[in-house]
Image (spheres, grey):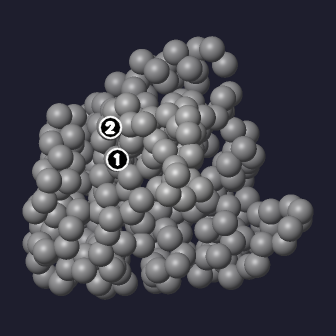
Amino acid sequence: MRDLPQLLRRLRRLRILVVGDVMLDHYIWGDATRISPEAPVPVIDIARDSWTAGGAANVALNLASLGAQCTVIGHFGADESGRRLEGLLRERGIESVSTPGGAPTIVKTRVLVRQQQLCRLDREAAPSAYEVPLRPLTALIGPALAACDAVILSDYAKGILNNTVLRELTRLARAKGKLIALDPKPRRGLAFDGLDLITPNKREALQLAGLEPSPHAPFPAAEVCARLHERHATRHLVVTLGEEGMLLSTGGKVRKVIPTAAREVFDVSGAGDTALAGLVLALAAGSSLEKAAHFANAAAGVVVGKLGTAAVTPAELTAYVGRR
């Protein structure tokens, strides 16, 4: 990536709008040296707690960390977790806009013992509690969309994004000539088409294509790409394949598979958010899909070498690319 310094400079001129399911990621760090006398479970001696932005908010965090300006629209509850999440974003210069409603802030609590995740505790309401009528939502989104260079729809199947919202956001983005990308969750069954980019992982791509995974069979790349283009007419498709790298497709045709950039993998939490942020930033800055994928792949390679949900900085990315 010889043009990395120039690309990183171009990113600083971009503003990206993120719409989706924001969350607060809470980590409890501790150790376990005994079993509880009450039940056959370990007793955790808590050393510390930490918090960071998760879900769509983590996408925003990665965008800002790489130097772009960012606005994120999602639901922040009128609770301590919502205030904490807004504060974390404010510290990074990210503008946050909360959708109306009385639902609690979504919180994912992970308990880590000796740097290994023991369990995860989720606090959230049903998806219907996070849905917003179209008119109030578009009133919030309209000004932010007009000022941005690209739109990212970050779907974690929690309720903010539905078919009506997707259709309207796609229409608005198209009318203003904005690049629009989606990280889809198949279990929501959302109908979308005409986007510039979607970024499912391997399992999600198979589900979106209506294919059943076959144990030990190679990933049916050509069939997946053709089916997804036929169903959704997306310009670009990037399937994240884990340790196998990234599959690139344009117009329903397989273009290339880029090997993974990761050297050490400690935690894959949020790596998809990092890849999505990197892809959209590079595409919005004028890079080709292949160059954008190399950039995003390297950024994700840095993040999986960290524990917990994390973001990558230009300095970390430059050093990482220089060592490869």
Q: Residue furthest front?
A: 37
Q: Amino acid at mark 1?
A: His
Q: Quadrant of residue 131?
A: bottom left
User: Where residue 164 sits: x, y (%)?
Assistant: 31, 85
Q: Which mark is residue 276?
A: none
Q: Earlier in the sequence, mark 2 or mark 1?
A: 1
Left or right of 153? Residue 224 is: right
159 relative to 195, above or below: below
Q: Secondary structure at mark 2?
A: strand
3 relative to 108, above or below: above
How many other residues sit within 10 Å of disc 1, few (<14), some (14-19) or many (≥20)? many
In this view of the protein, which residue sits in the foreground, 206 or 43?
43
User: What residue would you read off at disc 2?
Assistant: 49
Asked if one can make out residue 115 in the rendered structure from this viewpoint, the answer is no
Could you tell me if the residues under marks 2 and 1 are in contact, i.e. CB atoms within 8 Å?
Answer: yes
Residue at coordinates 50% horizontally, 71% vertically from top-left? 185
User: What residue would you read off at disc 1?
Assistant: 26
Residue at coordinates 20% horizontally, 54% vertically from top-left? 81
Asked if one can make out residue 90 in the rendered structure from this viewpoint, the answer is yes
How many other residues sit within 10 Å of disc 2, few (<14), some (14-19) or many (≥20)? few
Q: Residue furthest right?
A: 216
In this view of the protein, which residue sits in the foreground, 87 or 113?
113
The alpha-carbon separation of the residues under discs 2 and 1 comes to 7 Å
Left or right of 142? Residue 2 is: right
Left or right of 42? Residue 56 is: left
Q: Secondary structure at mark 1?
A: strand
In this view of the protein, which residue sits in the foreground, 40 or 241?
40
User: Where residue 89 sits: x, y (%)?
Assistant: 21, 42
Q: Amino acid at mark 2?
A: Asp
